[in-house]
Amino acid sequence: MIVVMEKGALSAQIANVTARIEQSGHQVHISEGEERTIIGVIGNGRPLDREQIERMDGVERTVPILRPFKLASREFHPQDTIVAVNGVSIGGQEVIVMAGPCAVESREQILETARAVKEAGAHVLRGGAFKPRTSPYSFQGLGKEGLRLLAAAREETGLPVVTEVMDPQMVPLVAAYADILQIGARNMQNYALLHAVGEAQRPVLLKRGMMSTIEELLMATEYILSHGNDRIILCERGIRTFEPYTRNTCDISAVPLLKQLSHLPVVVDPSHGTGKWELVEPVSRAAVAAGADGLLIEVHPHPEEALSDGAQSLKPARFADLMRGLRPVAAAVGRTL
């Protein structure tokens, strides 16, 4: 449940309520709103007497949360969460575009791409240093050297970096180079990894699993949120269906639904969502129109030579066209780009 404190409740009153809840064996998570403080009650301690809590000084009311995801819910945190990353605000008025190659392949490739997406108006540089691939014989990424190259691109362009981390033991290494830690679709329910990125207290981009429900995605966020790390960005990247004409089925309806259920920002990956570069631009427009807070787009200077996912990567000139086409869509729904 949540405890809604009165407007102007004193810090001593909030502390008293918190102490009472913790004495019953529950965990407490506090959300400071513009007008009120909300105390989230989490755990399997002794049953709480709601009437007793409501009689405490400073308490306005208690509200049961029936959904299994607690900390991610709108009930616990009515205001939108905005994730700030090196001057970039994800979840606010501006639609944030994260762009770059699927995988870092060389210094020349990542720097050329970073310069191009920065010039076109991208806000964050994406690129994989470690690549989970279906086949063990496919390119697996440059590893630590890829992280160094991403850091070099950030130093030159000023773009924050988002890259994937695949192993709990690798979190400190990736966090030393990346601004946002990405959890890929295959690892959405890697609970040890979710705990590790939660403990790291760094921004996390959490991709929806290819066969995961929206509730399962939000339950995965609870593992991260349980460590007090609310800097989470949800990512719809397409789910696996019976449709063979696209790599995945991009679930645009997930955007407004996630925004309704949760306070966390939502971005869409139309590159993985469709698997075809020809579909990236129209699906990007649809995502922005549906209320997405950002996009994750693959860009490569020479897609025909890409070591991974060339078929879904845009060339820099086409990415620039996409950015120009998105601005009137964003303006039509009251956003900026």
Image (tube, helix red, strand yellow):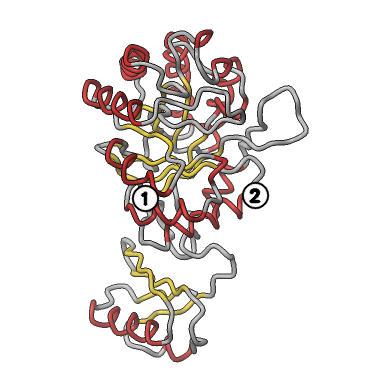
Q: Position of residue 3 (x, y in %)?
A: 42, 76
What residue is shown at x 43% (from left), y 57% (from top)? 195
* Residue occupied by mark 2: 213
Residue furthest out toward the front: 137
* Residue occupied by mark 1: 231
- What is the three-letter code of the residue carrying label 2? Thr
CA distance for labels 2 and 1: 21 Å
Decide: is 224 above or below 89: below
Decide: is 66 above or below 57: above
- The answer to which of 108 and 157 lies nearer the viewer is 108
Asked whether, in this view, residue 56 is left or right of residue 166, the answer is: left
Q: Position of residue 36 (x, y in %)?
A: 34, 68
Classify mark 1: residues with Cα within 10 Å, few (<14), some (14-19) or many (20+): many
What residue is shown at x 53% (from left), y 51% (from top)? 190
Q: Is residue 39 visible?
A: yes
- The answer to which of 16 and 177 lies nearer the viewer is 177
Element at label 2: loop
Q: Is residue 328 visible?
A: no
Residue furthest out toward the right: 242
Q: Earlier in the sequence, mark 2 or mark 1?
A: 2
Element at label 1: loop
Q: Quadrant of residue 278?
A: top right
Classify mark 2: residues with Cα within 10 Å, few (<14), some (14-19) or many (20+): few
- What is the three-letter code of the residue carrying label 1? Arg
Q: Position of residue 146 (x, y in %)?
A: 35, 26
Dot label at residue 189: none
Asked whether, in this view, residue 92 is left or right of residue 326, the answer is: left
